[in-house]
Image: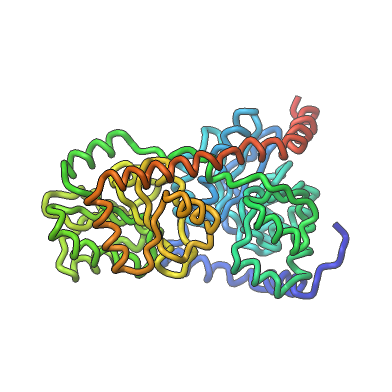
Amino acid sequence: MNDALPTALRLYRVLSAAATPLTPLLLARRLARGKEIRARLAERRGEPSAARPPGALVWVHGASVGEILSVLPLIERLSARNIGVLVTSGTVTSSGVAEQRLPPGVIHQFVPLDAPRFVRRFIAHWQPGLALFVESDLWPNLMLETARRGVPLILVNGRLSEASYERWRRLPDSIASLLRRLDLCLARSPLDGARLVELGAPRVITTGNLKLDAPAPPADARALADLRAAIGNRPVIAAASTHAGEETAMIEAHRRLRANFAHLLTVIAPRHPERGPGIAEAASAAGLAVALRSRRQLPDAATDIYVADTVGELGLIYRLAPVVFIGGSLVPHGGQNPIEAAKLGAAILHGVHVQNFAELYADLDTAHGAELVVDADRLTASLGALMAHPEARARLAEAARATVEAQSGALERTLQSLEPYLTQLQLAAQPRHA
C-alpha cells in the first residue's frame, strides 16, 4: 500500500513515536491500577515472552474478554488444522480467560502499545503469515506496520458501534486509509457491513455474529457443586457484567425483595473484578451481609449479597440464577453480551443502553426472550415478577435460547471466507519447514 498517509495519521505516528520514552511512566501507572501484570510488562514493549513456533502462524487480536471468547471456536478450528496461533489482547482479565480457555499450544501475549518501535519489534519476532483483528480494535500503528510487512490483514466479526461510526466519520480520510489496509472485512451484521463500506473498506462480506456460535461458558464441576451446596434451596437472582451504578440498583432491589422472598441471595458479578471490594462496601453500608468470591468465601445462610469478583466464572452464575440482569445497560455503556445467559437457560433482563448488541437485543425483545427494564424501580418489579412466576420465567428463557440458536452459523461462513488465505498460508510454510 503506497498511498500517502492523511495528515491526522502522520501526526499520530509522530506523536506516538515521540511519546515512547514515557512508556515506563504509563506502564507504572497502569500497574498500580491493576491494569497490567508486572511479570509481563515487557510484552507491552513488543518483547516476546515465548518463542515463535515453527511453520504457519496466524495472529488473532482481540481487545478484551468478549472478543477473545467470541473467536475461541475459530481458534480451535485453526489449531485443529495444525496451524500455529498467536493470540493477543490488552486487558488483565482477558489474559486470565486466555489461560483458562485457549487450546493447548496456542500462545497468548499482551498486544504491544501502539508505538512504531514496539509494533515493529513484535512483528519482527512473530512473523505472522495472517493477521485476524476481531471486531473493532483498529490501532493505527498496529495496522500500518502489519500491512507494511506484507501480512494479509482481515477483520473478523467486524462491528462499528454508533459512537465509533460517528467518531470515525469526523476523520474520513484517516479511517479510509486504515480500512484500505484490510484485505477483507467480515462484518457481524448488515448494518456493520454498510458502515464499513461507507467508511472506505474495499471488500466486505456479512458473515454473522461469531458470539452466537460460541459455546456456553463452562463451569468447574467442583466449584459448581460447592456453590450449590452453600446456597441450598435459597432463591437466587443475579446481575452479570455490571458497571458502576448498576450494583447500587441491585442492592436496592435486594433490600426491597427480601420481604417477599425469604432468604433471598443476590449474586453480583462486576464487569471489572477489581471493583469487587467497593461493591462489598456499598452493600455493607446498606446494612446487608456480604461475601466476596475473590477471597474464596462462599455464601452462608446469613449472606445477602455474594460478589463474584473473579474472572471466567459467569458459567457458574448462569447455571445457578434463574433470573439475570445483564449489565452495562442501565448506565450508558452500551450493554454486555446476553448470549451466554441465553444458552444456559437464564431469564434475561436488560436496560435501555444496549447499542453494542442492538440488533440482538431487539430480536430477543421481539421474541419475548428478554425483558426491558428502564430504571431501578422497574428492575425490582421485574425481578420480583419473574421470581414469583416460574412459568413466565421459563417461557422467557426458552424464547431467548431459541432466538440465539436460530441466528448461529457465523463460524462456518467465516471459515469459508478465510479458506483461501489459510490454504495459501499452509502452502507457503511447507517449503521452509519441510
* Res. 212 visible in picture: yes
In the image, residue 429 above or below residue 356: above
| Residue 268 x, y percent position in the rendering | 30, 57
Residue drawn at point x = 39 percent, y = 56 percent: 371
Q: Nearer the viewer, residue 141 or 418?
A: 418
| Residue 415 x, y percent position in the rendering | 67, 36
In this image, 314 relative to 413: left or right?
left
Residue drawn at point x = 53 percent, y = 60 percent: 356
* Res. 313 visible in picture: no
Residue drawn at point x = 70 percent, y = 63 percent: 140
Q: Nearer the viewer, residue 160 or 270?
A: 160
In this image, 332 relative to 306: left or right?
right
Q: Nearer the viewer, residue 388 or 308?
A: 388
Task: Choose top left, top right, bottom left or bottom right for residue 148.
Answer: bottom right
Q: Where, quadrant-wise, is the N terminus in this rendering?
A: bottom right
Q: Residue furthest top?
A: 434
Q: How many numbered marks appear? A: 0
In this image, 357 relative to 84: left or right?
left
| Residue 325 x, y percent position in the rendering | 35, 56
Task: Choose top left, top right, bottom left or bottom right for residue 290.
Answer: bottom left
Residue drawn at point x = 77 percent, y = 36 percent: 420
Q: Nearer the viewer, residue 198 or 423?
A: 198
Coloring scheme used? rainbow
In the image, residue 369 above or below residue 82: below
| Residue 431 x, y percent position in the rendering | 80, 28
Q: Where, quadrant-wise, is the C terminus in this rendering?
A: top right
